Image (spheres, helix red, strand yellow):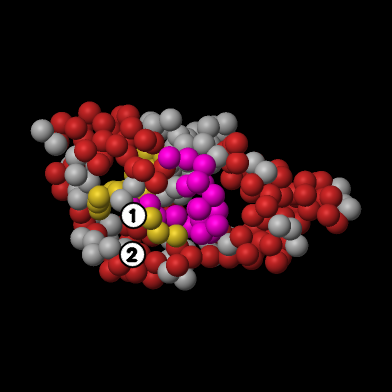
Amino acid sequence: MFPWDQIDTVLLDMDGTLLDLHFDNHFWLSLVPQCLSESRGIPVEQARKLVEQAYAEVAGTLEWYCLDYWQRTLQLDILALHRTLVERIQLRQDSMPFLKALGECGKRRILLTNAHPDSLALKLEHTELATGLDEILSSHSTGYPKEAQAFWQQVITKFGLDPGRCLFVDDNEAILEAARQAGIGHQLGISNPDSRQPHKQFQAFPAIDDYRLLLEDLQAANK
């Protein structure tokens, strides 16, 4: 699928790409509306509509991913609520074999996530994900989300990347497009980010539902 001899670095999203997105979907679409309903004394469906409207107002911006923003906006202890669901934080079953194979083949593995640093720390605490990565960056430290070209320019400079020799993996097609526009040479979508939801369809990028589909070609290229 990819010319692995022309790829030095693999840039990887976290939620929905290396971790099962079920945790985040359940948290933001079920738990948060339920807690808002209880805190304001309103029906759950009304709370859900308020939350969805608030999400839509900042979609694609850094605020959408910011726990501090949502704590102020919704008047809920968002991080404390995260901790009530830690048993739902799960790696995709195919993530660690893929990350291990990349390392064995000498590929640099960099996590690029829009997750807030507190959410990132919690997920690293409850999984072995960090052991399969060389470097980790939250977009919050750049001041821009991954949707922005300014984010990618900072990443390329910070890590000294040759963008044309990078592969970027994400479950969000708009972010894959942002990476392409920034000159990242190769993009790959993940069609099953949430293990409990139907597969997604990607229009402009190749996509897979199991990293093991890449292992044979990756390992063959390293011989």
- In the rendering, which numbered label is found on residue 155? 2
- In this figure, what is the number of numbered marks? 2
Q: In this view, does 24 lie above or below 197?
A: below
Badges 1 and 2: C-beta atoms under 8 Å apart? no
x 59%, y 45%: residue: 24
Local packing at callout 2 (Cα closer than 10 Å; few below 14, some 14-19, many 20+) is some
The stretch in magenta equals: 110-128
x 21%, y 57%: residue: 164
Residue under label 1, please give it.
135
Residue 186 lies left or right of residue 76; in this view the side is left
x 63%, y 64%: residue: 68
Percent coordinates x, y for residue 10 in the rendering: 28, 49
Local packing at callout 1 (Cα closer than 10 Å; few below 14, some 14-19, many 20+) is few
Secondary element type, mark 2: helix
Residue 123 lies left or right of residue 215; in this view the side is right
Q: Does the magenta stretch include residue 118?
A: yes
- In the rendering, which numbered label is found on residue 48? none
Percent coordinates x, y for residue 187 in the rendering: 32, 48
Quote the CA–CA distance across marks 1 and 2.
Answer: 11 Å
Percent coordinates x, y for residue 7 in the rendering: 20, 48
Q: Does the magenta stretch include residue 8?
A: no
Foreground tag (1 vs 2): 1
